[in-house]
């Protein structure tokens, strides 16, 4: 069951999710041009296209989603994802759906991340409480 004003669109495959994501008119997609570069712990420099980096991130996290129009959460969940991983992404996207919406991308992500952290903490606390039940 979802909040009455939030619709969830679930994708069966990562490819379906990506296809839908790149068709959306989302401003953040314009920043996915060029390469993402990083240095590993050994000092070696790596470079990957921004789109490839996104796919790598999605596969590592096993759950990925985005919010469209403040009322629709799109989500892909790998079969090996844990409930905690799913809750984190859903809470993050719900964080984006709640006002106020920050025009600063960094502040907006911080707000959404806070929702995710609260949901994860509640999930962990629930597990502890349930385990104490006779």
Image (tube, rainbow, N blue to C red):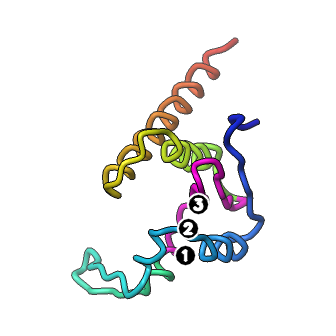
Query: Element at badge 1?
Result: helix
In the image, 60 versus 5, the foreground residue is 5
Q: Quadrant of residue 62?
A: bottom right
In the image, 30 versus 53, the foreground residue is 30
**What residue did someone put label 1 on?**
55
**What residue did someone put label 3 on?**
64
Q: Residue at x 35, y 58 (%)?
A: 105
**What residue did someone put label 2 on?**
58
Read off the magenta span: 54-79
Residue 27 position in % (x across, y down):
46, 69
Check the picture and name the quadrant holding the N terminus.
Answer: top right
- Disc 2 packing (10 Å; few <14; some 14–19; many ≥20): some
Residue 8 position in % (x across, y down):
71, 50
Contact, mark 1 vs mark 2 (Cβ under 8 Å): yes
Q: Mark 1 to mark 2: distance in Å?
A: 5 Å
Give the vertical position of 33 relative to 93 (above or below).
below
Give the vertical position of 78 relative to 72 (above or below).
below
Q: Going from the N terminus, do you reach mark 3 or mark 1 first? A: 1
Residue 98 position in % (x across, y down):
50, 39
Most extreme residue toward the left, as rendered? 43
In the image, 59 versus 51, the foreground residue is 51
In the image, 72 versus 65, the foreground residue is 72
Q: Mark 3 to mark 2: distance in Å?
A: 6 Å
Q: Is residue 58 magenta?
A: yes
Q: Left or right? Give the position of 56 relative to 108.
A: right
Check the picture and name the quadrant holding the C terminus.
Answer: top right
Q: Residue at x 59, y 28 (%)?
A: 127
The tag on residue 100 is none
């Amino acid at each position: 069951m979802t909040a009455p004003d939030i619709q969830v669109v679930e994708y069966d495959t990562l490819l379906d999710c990506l296809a839908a994501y790149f068709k959306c008119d989302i401003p953040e997609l314009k920043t996915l041009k060029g390469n993402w570069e990083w240095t590993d712990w050994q000092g070696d420099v790596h470079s990957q296209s921004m789109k490839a980096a996104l796919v790598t991130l999605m596969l590592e996290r096993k759950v990925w989603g985005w919010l469209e129009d403040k009322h629709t959460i799109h989500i892909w969940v790998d079969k090996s994802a844990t409930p905690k991983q799913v809750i984190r992404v859903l809470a993050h996207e719900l964080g984006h759906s709640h006002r106020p919406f920050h025009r600063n991308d960094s502040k907006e992500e911080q707000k959404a991340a806070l929702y995710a952290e609260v949901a994860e903490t509640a999930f962990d606390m629930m597990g502890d409480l349930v385990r104490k039940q006779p």
